[in-house]
Amino acid sequence: MIEFWLSLPPLLQATLKGLAVIAVIFPLAGAGSMAERKVSAWIQGRPGPNRAAIPWLVKIPFLGRALQRLGLFQLLADGLKFFFKEDPVPGHVNKFYFFLAPAVALIPALTTVVAVPFGAWLDGDTVVPIGLANVDLGLLAIFAVSSLGVYALILAGWASNSKYPFLGGVRASAQFISYELSMTISVLPVFLWVNSPGMRGSLSLARVVEFQSLPGFWGGAWFIFTMPVCALIFLIALFAETNRQPFDMPESEADLVGGFHTEYGAFKWAIFFVAEYAHMIVGSGIFTLLFLGGWNPLPWVSLADFSALIGIAGNPLVVGVVSIVIFLLKVLFLIFFFMWVRWTVPRFRYDQVMVLGWQKLLPLSIANLFFYLVVIALLQERL
Amino acid sequence: MPTEFNFPDTAAKNASAAPRVAVARGDSAQLPPQEFEPERMSLSMGPSHPSTHGVLRIQMELDGEVVTEARPVIGYLHRGDEKIAENMTYNQFVPYTDRLDYLAPLANNMAYAIAVERLAGLEVPERCQAIRVITAELARISAHLIGLGAFGIDTGAWTIFLYTFTEREKLYRLFEELTGARFTTSYTRIGGVARDLPEGWTGRVLEFCDQFLPILEEILSLLTRNKIFMDRTVGVGVISKEDALSYGLTGPNLRGSGVAADLRKDRPYSGYERYEFDVPVGSTGDSYDRYLVRGEEMRQSVRIIRQAIEQLPGGDWYARDARRIFAPPKDKILSSMEELIQNFMIVTEGPQMPAGEVYFEAENPKGALGFFIVSKGGGVPYRLKIRAPSFCNLSILPKVCAGAMISDVVSILGSLDFVMGECDR
């Protein structure tokens, strides 16, 4: 099967992989909204959506009821609803940009997936990452593309030609730009560590994971242990960049009603949300790759060791599936963490978000960078 | 295209303002930048907005995100309750009091009943007083729970709201058992209450109190030392002692500003002097203080309820001797001519009041709810004026909101904890 796959022309391979990723990301984003409702329900001590049912499917013993209790049919119903409900366009909007904004939101969200490796398989002894493209620019490409996402929010805010969306758009532009700085600086130590002098430099995420699967104490340690401050800053910035509470200024529903998407409804609104969840999934994926060891099951236990341990090393397909599952589990845990935080803490005020970004996170990330510059210069040769 | 949505409109307004300044100075080209009027945006928050708690509308002038001017626009829920009162007997107005502060109908019922009883010079039996105190304090807990939950939502903490709603639901079960209705209780009658306490009800209230206090601590612990919540509330919406008094604030909002004024202590009614409780006061008068005061008031209410149930006297639960005010028991009505006629007269003519005037305020969850009643005798008030605490509490809004940010306005609204049903009447 692997041989057949490798015999396909590269363009076809890439297209198929791309379609596969879209086919995964879209339902995952939908499931994200469902999970949001379920997780919030669990946190708030209520059952959450558990009534919707498909007549014949729900009759399947055990499974049907279980799916119903998990609210999976509700997810389908919601998805269908967004397709079929009326899509009103207010008379006062600028139609072109109003329609453009959701598309602009979705494109970067899906494009960033390209550079995120999400698993690996063993070719003999070498670990080959699975991903759409092992881009050398790696993280830089992701940052560059995902920062385009803010244009969608600004565009939506402006095109709506209404006051609450306008305020949401203004907040979005300021907030996202501020947090991109500390986000980028916070991951620099990781790449300084990975690209020690004399090596071929690369910002590829697969390489970061490779580094976290090296043998030895320092090799196998995930970066969250060796660089906790980086991980913390990156996580906080991730919250801000993915527009999640407590940083959801652009839409903060208590004061701006719906923020940038106040005037949106039906499918266009749903696209904004798919984009938001896709951002969250990709963001969690990057965090997993950078700080949580990617597809390595445990700290100091690399994928290769693990597959040898449970005796699947000879079967590349199984290793690939196992690695993807491990990776997805970590991503899902992070997404759960996002939701957990959202339903626990109150929301910042807009100026407090800015103060946190510019006066606290940015100096901290710069100091952190200098600290690791010194540490890496002094220590790395000896480790 | 509707013009009010066009931003160029505001721009035009500002453009027309700019030459005015320039003409006055006689030189438009060399104006120093700080002399320009900053561009203002008007923003209408409400009447349909997630955080205006009903149908309040706030007309704001914004300088960026900073509110330079805020004008509350009220009246969207005006139903003419005071005029309605002139057209019905005293007992018939009891259901209308449910709809004043619809988060604490039991407390409104009591305030209204006591006001009319003061007019008649009637003293209800001690058991009736104690029952009213228990119900009013339960209503206070339920109202503060909603206030707390809504405040949580306003600052972005949704989960608080669901937690408080769960507790309120337990209270509503108790209300339903007692009065037959969850929301619009209409429990009091002039001269008594609608019916005696059901069997075992006080035990269930005590059970509720026992399990409620730990849950309350849990809910409050989610907010009290939460850094984000403190950032959002400490030093926000500060109302000084003097301002609070001069704007006529009452209730937790006044106590949050450091004035230990509580009508239950200052002018005890319905036997409040028999119970021991503390009056919490804030120190700075910001949103955070008002939040803390409400939290403590719930604990004190539990204290009062426990004492009231412990000391609950037996005997009559309505004024048996007030034959022209409170209807006789049902079995008597069905078996005796005298009582039948008495009941018929009270139902058709209303409880008979002497001519005169009375003003009575009770310490409701939102503040001092006052009823001013002018009677010319008979069963119908000549004029009934309601002093609504939410109305007075909202009057300070322009003062506290000026200079705040949009998000602050929302948290200030949450901390003032008003009910539009009462404000608009």
Image (spheres, helix red, strand yellow):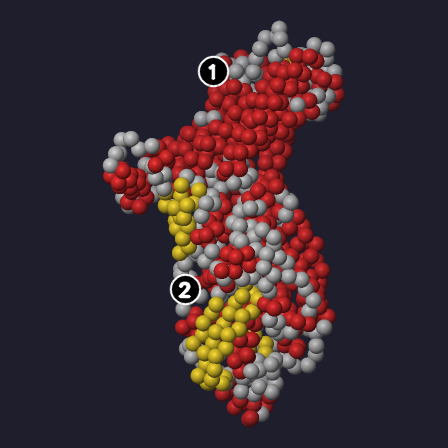
Q: What crowding class fits label 1: few (fewer than 14 Cα within 10 Å), some (14-19), or many (20 or more)?
A: few
Q: Give me the residue at 53% from left, 53% from top.
A: B240
Q: Vertically, is B171 above or below B220?
A: below
* Chain holding disc 1: A
**Residue A318 left/right relative to A103:** right
Position of the N terminus of chain B by quadrant: top left
> How far apart, in angstroms, are the residues tagged by discs 2 and 1?
69 Å
- Secondary structure at badge 2 equals loop
Outermost residue on the front side: it is B25
The local crowd at label 2, few if under 14, some if 14 to 19, many if 20 or more residues have their Cα within 10 Å, is: few
Q: Residue at x 60, y 87 (%)?
A: B321
Above/below status of A1 relative to B303: above
Measured from the top left, where is residue B348 in percent x and y?
47, 84
In this view, the residue farthest toward the bottom is B337
Indicate the position of residue A309 as horizontal and vertical percent values. Answer: 75, 21
Residue carrying label 1: A11
Picture layout, residue A177 above or below residue B283:
above
Residue B78, label in figure: 2
Q: Chain of mark 2?
A: B
The image quadrant of residue B3 is top left
Whole-percent x and y of residue B222? 64, 46
Q: Nearer the viewer, residue A303 or B179?
A: B179
Amino acid type indicated by mark 2: His
